Image: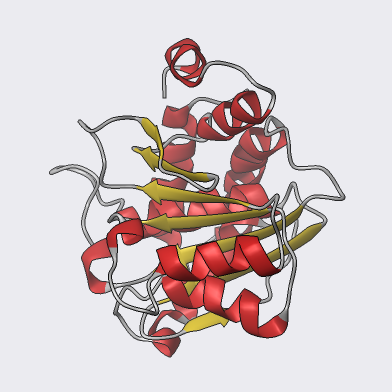
Amino acid sequence: MTSESDDKNAMSGFKRLFGREPEGRERVMEALELAVAHSAAAISGFGKNTRVVLACDVSGSMQTPVSAKSTIMLYDVGLVLAMLLQTRCANVEIGMFGDIWKRIGVRSNRVLAGVQEFYRREGEVGYATNGYLVVRDLLQRKAVVDKILLFTDCQLWDSMGTESIQALWIRYKRDLAPRARLYLFDLRGYGQTPLRLMNDDVYLIAGWSDKIFGVLVALENGAHALESINSMSI
């Protein structure tokens, strides 16, 4: 298994290549794709029959570096985690939300190429943080899924109003998918509770690592959340 450091190195290398045409660019891209693919291969718990929606926040606040000396932004982290996961799912929808929610078609076996496609189309959805639109879209289409994962930088669960993600989620569970689960990845959440169960099968996860997917599997298999988090050192 590759480490979080390996993923960050691949991500940094990709960002240096993006938008340029250096000699040997394709060869370097293939090497980076291979490095990231090792992380994807280690992800478990998302079988062929698991119906998954992956939604990436592309709001303005996501354009924040993960640390003072890093070129990697929260936006990059959310995209890479989503692309890692989509390579492991046979039944998956992936997209981005801002002012609107839009599903995006990407090649299922290319992590960094998929990230590049999102970079290219970033401005198509605007820069708000309307994550509730993901659940509303499922309700309107009467689409039943097992897991919804939102990669963002804030606690969308706290939004207010009749169109809040909380109110829509309650309707979705009641009317369409009683066994569905919602995972909110707060990518800015270092220093907060690593994992918190809200209610109605909603999980708030603070911080980020490719190992977090193993925590989700442990939770669903009945393992104690904190024990799983401590053993995986996310």
Q: Residue furthest front?
A: 174
**153 left or right of 225 in image:** left
Could you tell me which residue is drawn at 66 percent across and 53 percent down? 180
Residue 56, compared with residue 189, is above or below; it is below
Report if residue 54 is visible in the image: yes
**Closer to us: 198 or 120:** 198
**80 left or right of 177 in image:** left
Q: Quadrant of the C terminus?
A: top left
Q: Quadrant of the N terminus?
A: top right
Could you tell me which residue is drawn at 13 percent across and 44 percent down? 68
Q: Quadrant of residue 166?
A: bottom left
Q: Position of residue 28 (x, y in %)?
A: 57, 51
Q: Position of residue 8 (x, y in %)?
A: 41, 39
**Closer to us: 128 or 13:** 128
Residue 134, compared with residue 173, is above or below; it is below
Q: Position of residue 146 (x, y in %)?
A: 71, 53
Residue 171, compared with residue 77, is above or below; it is below
Report if residue 117 is visible in the image: no
**Closer to us: 204 or 177:** 177
Could you tell me which residue is drawn at 55 percent across and 60 percent down? 25
Q: Position of residue 218 (x, y in %)?
A: 62, 23
